[in-house]
Image (cartoon, helix red, strand yellow):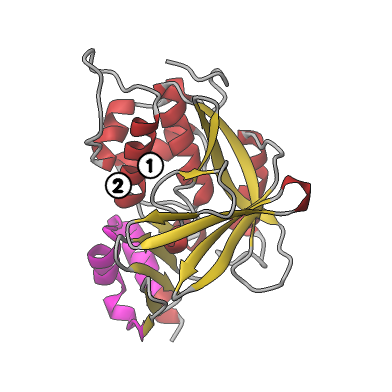
Amino acid sequence: MRGSGGDMWSGDELDLGAYLERIGYDGPIGEDGELRPDLATLYAVHRAHTGAIAFESLDVLLGRPIELGVKAIEDKLVRSRRGGYCYEQNSLLAAALERIGFDVSGRGARNRTRGDTLLAVTHAVLVVTVEGEPWLCDAGFGYQGPREPVPLTRPGAELPQGEWTYTVREEAGGILVLCLHRGGVRRDLYAFSPQHYYPVDYVLLNHYSSSHPNSAFVGQVIVQYPGDAVRTALVGRELTRLHPDGRIERELVAPDELLALLDREFGLRLSGRDAEELERMNCLGD
């Protein structure tokens, strides 16, 4: 099945059955065994994906190339049960949604979690149109990102997702800003314009994020997970637990605890070679 965008996201190359098994999809299925491109399916796929696949950029730290071809992403995130960062996560989600029959388009966003500093557009998000209504879909913003699709036609409204609440507000020029409520405070996460982005644009952004010395992903461990009750992030050796009421818990992780923590907290079990290299690099940071 195709969305109106044809095969822009190479959905025809994706093993949809393997993907659905990987994310533990248990949402609606038609009598013919096919998934329908409707809102209920979109919610179910998005929520299952963000619940099953951790955000991580360990391959950047290990000096491995980040490939954005659908087969390469499938091999890593689906068959090898690894995680990935925004270009991988949302390219995979886009391919799956396109394969189901959704109309999927890309956007480029500016991270706003670092205060007033103006950052370049480096985050990839998706906009999925269902029955004429656009929905923000994002499986790749880490522990503060949405677990479910976010409607883009209700600016200013509070949009609860379990114990967490989001808001989309509009700025001049058609800029939309995704905000997260924490402890009674609304905080900007990122902003994006109406300009469409395409897979080739994400190749360029991926090159910067995976190799530029100023990229936050270069030279440090970053692994995150948007849990239902607690959001968890490991950056460097600091493990952070974020609660809906605004509480933040932090602890330092010893080098010899890293691999066990990745398995326990994020469901990541690295292969022998990658595990050994990551452990070696982490110990060198002492």
> Please, is residue 3 above or below residue 235 in the view?
above
Label 1 SS: helix
Judge whether 164 appears above or below 175 on screen: below
In the rendered structure, the answer to whether residue 171 lies left or right of residue 40 reads: right
Taking the spot 47% from the left edge, 25% from the top edge, the residue there is 102
Which element carries disc 2, helix, strand or loop? Answer: loop
Q: Residue at x 50, y 63 (%)?
A: 180
Determine which residue is flagged by label 2. Answer: 81
Mark 1 residue crowding within 10 angstroms, few (<14) / some (14–19) / many (20+): many
Decide whether residue 270 is among the magenta residues: yes
Q: Amino acid at mark 2?
A: Arg
Magenta span: predominant SS is helix
How far separated are the C-alphas under marks 1 and 2?
Answer: 17 Å
Q: Outermost residue toward the top?
A: 32
Left or right: residue 286 versus residue 67 is left
Q: Which mark is residue 46?
A: 1
Q: Are marks 1 and 2 in contact (CB under 8 Å)?
A: no
- Left or right, 40 with respect to 200, comes to left
Give the magenta range. 251-280
